[in-house]
Image (cartoon, helix red, strand yellow):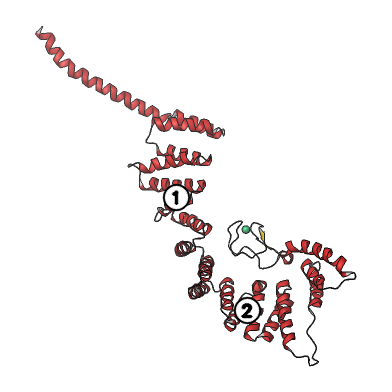
Amino acid sequence: MDFDLSWLLLGLPVAFVLGWLASRLDLRQLRLENRQAPKAYFRGLNFLLNEQQDQAIDAFIEAVQNDPDTQELHFALGNLFRRRGEYQRAVRVHEHLLSRGDLNRADRDRAQHALAQDFLSAGLLDRAEVALQKLEGTRFENESRLALLAIYERSREWAQAEAVAAKLDASDQASYAARRAHHLCEQAAEHSTRGNADEALRLLQEAAQLAPQAPRPPIDTAALLLRQGRAAEAWGTLSALARTAPLALPLYAAALQQAAQGAGEQAAATALLHERYEAEPSIDVLEALMALEASMQSAVPADGRPAPTASRDRYLEHLTRVPGSLLAASRWLAGETLRDDARTHPPVQRALDQVARPQMRYRCAACGFEAHQYFWHCPGCQAWDSYPPRRVEEL
Ligand SMILES: [Zn+2]
């Protein structure tokens, strides 16, 4: 009996140790198998390659449940959800990743970036903004600033847009000066409508310094000065602009004419407009010229001096320069006395006006969006400076 007992006392710990070792070996074997053959993962991949996204997601969910530490699978799953438009599920996956304490810095940034993408894709701009702001100082910084800039521009938050563009100006290789000038002009317009003209002028001045070649700051400045009755300053601004940005003249020809009349600079303005019209015929420049000539004509006493060319002849001249100009044709007809006028003129005029009206529009060179108003920022494609400063007929 004593002999048996001693063997038992010795055998029990040995059996225990052997059993423990065997269980460890089993576990290792199991982990090795899991690592070597994550079947669910490969099954998911296979489904994905066969464009069977539903089955792929099921397989990936199974894989994530079997091994919750696999962040790569989480990322793959989150991106799949987003691509399918299942934003809530994508957000849940990425938020779950972010909540994990064992994630390294690079993966945390990546999850934050993916979360911002989810919100952007879902159109939840407020939440996207917060998620993007958290990417400052990461390798996604530049990309997130660009996305923030797009959000602020879309929601017309111009001060914030300018602040982000200023950061991009400092960090990115591209120049954002022209875009920042637009942001300042937009802020100036808001101040101007609120009656805060001084602040508007200050912002416009800042915009002009930031982008000296951009035509918008002087054009907006002159418009504001004209509204304040400061014609001489407006004339100074626009006549200087005519030297730096002559191609944009059709946009400010009317303002230049008004400023010149207010400042008594009709002769200089006529010469300037005439020279530009000769170089590049444009209906806007022509009409500014005609308005100036008419004002000079009415100011000159009838002392026998030859009158400037009559308006309607100018339209005919324009028709020879720009053959097929419906704008010139409809304007010429408007002043013409036709035979049997009362009966035939109105319908003919209406028909011509109808076909001429689309020719008056401006067209975005980036997306083709057309509008009667000139836009610095295309409402169709959100591009800046994408509208040529000429009417559709003159493109
Ligand atoms: Zn556009």
| Spatial CA span between label 1 and label 2 | 47 Å
In the figure, 101 relative to 291: above or below?
Answer: above
Q: Which mark is residue 299?
A: none
Residue kind at label 1, given as amino acid type: Arg
Disc 1 packing (10 Å; few <14; some 14–19; many ≥20): some
Find residue 127 and name its label.
1
- Tell me if residue 66 comes above or below residue 391 in the rendering: above
Query: Would you say 97 lies left or right of 278 here?
Result: left
Q: Residues at badges 1 and 2 in contact (C-beta under 8 Å)?
A: no
Which quarter of the figure has residue 224? Answer: bottom right
Closer-to-camera residue (34/302): 302
Q: Amino acid at mark 2?
A: Arg
Q: Kindly indicate the quadrant of the structure image that contains residue 34.
A: top left
Q: Is mark 1 within 8 Å of ligand 1?
A: no
Which residue occupies 72% across, 76% down? 277
Foreground: disc 1 or disc 2: 1
Q: Helix or strand or loop: what does disc 1 sit on? A: helix
Q: x, y percentage for residue 3?
A: 11, 9
Which residue appears at 67% of the width and 75% of the height?
A: 254
Q: Nearer the viewer, residue 364 or 172?
A: 364
Direction front: furthest residue:
342
Residue that carries the numbered disc 2 in the rendered image: 243
Q: Is 3 in front, or is 73?
A: 73
